[in-house]
Image (cartoon, rainbow, N blue to C red):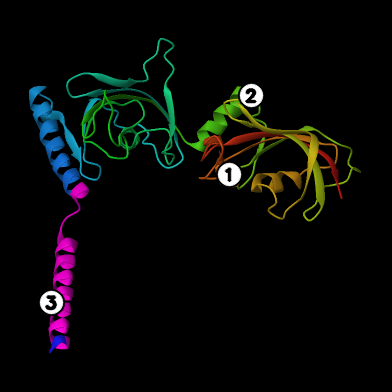
Amino acid sequence: MNVTKNWLKWSVAVSLIGLLTAQMACQPDPGEALNERKRRENEEDILAYLDKTNLRPKAEKNELTGLYIIRTKAVENGQLAKEGDEVKFFFTQSRLDSVVVDSSETAAGIPNLATVGVTRGITARLYQSLQLLKEGEEAIILAPYDPTDNKGGNLLLPAYTPVRYDIKVVSVRTEDEQIQDYLVANKLTAAEKTESGLRFLLTKKSPADSAQVKAGQTAKVKYTGKLLNGNQFDASADGSEFNVGTGAVIQAWDEALVKMRVGEKATIVLPSSIGYGPTGRLNQTTGIYTIPPYAPLAFELEVVSSK
């Protein structure tokens, strides 16, 4: 009899636990529910702001991002930034009560720089906005709160606060356009362009009987590497050794070195597709890119030996 009673108690307890677990599983995540409510409130605040400022007739909503766009200067044939493109822009970020939170406007008039596909160092809403505007366009962007932008909030911009961006897109340049501008500015337009996009210019020629660098050989190379803004990210004055044509170095080097003889020097300019690509090179200690993603690069190369 005691066994039966104990079994019944145990059975009821298990059933109650199962029922409570099922009920808890059906309950919405409190954080998710709060975000949904705040998004709805943000939408109401933005629509009220549009009505108050008489901007609603000019506003268009991007359904993918939830951003409201009011183009104050439209450019019909302007270039729209795509993955890997460089965008120069000015912006002011403010709350809907006109309190300025952030701004790129400076006395020097130097625009901000961003690359489409690189989200580090830029707010999600500003990043999304830049992809919706063409070169030369100016716009007001009204953005609902994004938890990745301002998690927890701060005194100037409390959590769940919708914002206004005033943006002017100064220029949009593809990697190829960046390279062309660099070649012109540095008088390197005589450089050969290969199918991969590599620009190669021999700056010191060796005699014809000098050893030709070949794939599979070990080459010793002196080099200096720079971003196209002139910032040096690497160099080897004494020379570094590696196997040519084996993927030990970036593709651009493998391609350039087999065009050279021992003793020769060359300048190469390359797109990121044969450099460090969409990942770039990140300093894990500082969290700063020594080579940003999608960065075209320039190298000065000198072949010391190859055997």
Q: Position of residue 62 (x, y in %)?
A: 22, 40
- Report the mark closest to the observer, 1 or 3: 3
Residue receiving disc 1: 276
Image position of 252 with respect to 222: above or below? below
Residue at 26 percent of width and 19 percent of height: 100
- Reading the chain from its start, which is encountered first: label 2 or label 1? 2
Q: What stretch is highlighted in magenta?
A: 3-32
Q: In what element is the residue under mark 3?
A: helix
Q: In this view, does 290 lie to the left or right of 139?
A: right
Disc 2 and disc 3: Cα gap in Å? 83 Å
Residue 98: x %, y % from top left: 20, 19
Given the current orientation, which residue lies at the most extreme right position? 209
Which corner quadrant of the image does residue 167 belong to? top left
- In depth, the one of 152 and 187 nearer the eye is 152
Q: Which amino acid does label 2 sit on?
A: Asn
Q: Residue 25 carries which label?
A: none
Mark 2 burial class by Cα count in 10 Å: few <14, some 14-19, many 20+ = few
Residue bearing the label numbered 3: 12
- Residue found at x 39% / y 13%: 106
Q: Mark 1 falls on what kind of element? A: loop
Spatial CA distance of label 1 from label 3 is 63 Å
| Chain-order first, disc 1 or disc 3 | 3
In the picture as drawn, the residue positioned furthest to the front comes out as 2
- Amino acid on which disc 1 is placed: Tyr
